Amino acid sequence: MPSVVRILLITALCSLATACRLFKFPGVHRIQVQQGNIITQEMVDQLKPGMTRRQVRFVLGTPLLEDTFNPNRWDYINRIRSPKGEETQKRFTVYFNGDRLIETSGDWQPSGWP
């Protein structure tokens, strides 16, 4: 019998430990979580056609994703989760021809591009 009680006690403790995530305790401080690259419109406006990869990396930082199968594409992704659990995601992609910037796409667009 003691082993049955021990198993039930362990099961109850495990259930309680995992149930804590289900309840929202009042007064608990939750923070905003930001992951990925921080990209602003001012940063994107600094991009000019013909810039080198090194210049783009200086302006935008290291890309979150560098596609192994397409080395001429860099993806910058930014995710923000609010304290309420709402998540927003923004993307910005730059394309190169060799070592030169030729195109961009995503949630920001550089001003002054054709």
Image: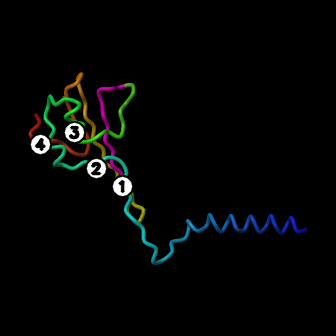
Amino acid type at image mark 4: Ser
The one of 21 and 46 positioned closer to us in this rendering: 46
Residue at the spot of label 2: 38
Label 1: element kind: strand
C-alpha gap between disc 2 and disc 1: 9 Å
- Circle nearer the N terminus (3, 4): 3
* Crowd rating for badge 2 (residues with CA inside 10 Å; few <14, some 14–19, many 20+): some
* Crowd rating for badge 3 (residues with CA inside 10 Å; few <14, some 14–19, many 20+): few
Task: Judge from the rendering whether residue 64 lies leftward or rightward of residue 102; answer left or right.
Answer: right
Residue 13 placement (x, y as % from top left)? 70, 68
- Circle nearer the N terminus (1, 4): 1
Residue at the spot of label 3: 58
C-alpha gap between disc 2 and disc 4: 19 Å
Badges 2 and 1: C-beta atoms under 8 Å apart? yes
Give, as a single range, the part of the protein colored magenta: 70-80
Amino acid type at image mark 3: Phe
Residue at the spot of label 1: 34
